[in-house]
Image (spheres, rainbow, N blue to C red):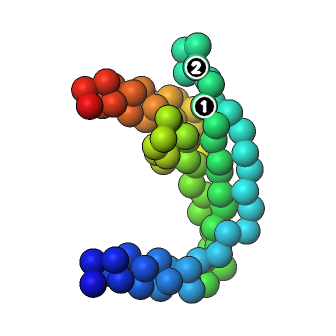
Amino acid sequence: MRLALPLIASLALSACVSTIAEERGTLRVGIETYDTVTRTFQREDGSTYARTTVRVGAERVSCRPNDPVDCRAVVRQTQFTRSFQ
């Protein structure tokens, strides 16, 4: 049952939102470069929103699209948190 709930939730969301654009890029934080993906989604009512994800090691973290300062802060926080694991 635990596995079924996330699957049901993702199916419900996929019916309401579709990906209309995807842009790949990179983000430089200090001497490291991270892969980014910015996706633009469209809701059933026609409105859109974007989401950027940054790959930090094996993790993917989200930040505000077109906001390198926010994305760098998220990467630094993830690095800091990973240093204690």
Residue sitting at x 57%, y 54%: 51
Between 14 and 48, the residue placed more toward the observer is 14
Front residue of this view, candidates 25 and 48: 25
The reply to whether residue 70 is visible in this rendering is: no
Real-space Cα distance between discs 2 and 1? 7 Å
Percent position of residue 76, x then y? 42, 26
Label 1: how many Cα within 10 Å (few below 14, some 14–19, many 20+):
some
Secondary structure, mark 2, is strand
Q: In the image, is 85 to the left or to the right of 10?
A: left
Q: Amino acid at mark 1?
A: Tyr
* Vertical placement of residue 19 versus 1, above or below: above
- Looking at the image, which residue is at 33% across and 30% down? 82
CB under 8 Å between callouts 2 and 1?
yes
Residue 18, by quadrant, is: bottom right
Please provide percent x and percent y for residue 75. Answer: 46, 32
Q: For mark 2, what is the residue?
A: 32
Residue at mark 1: 34
Q: Please state the horizontal and vertical placement of residue 80, each as a whole percent of the image.
A: 33, 25
Q: Quadrant of the N terminus?
A: bottom left
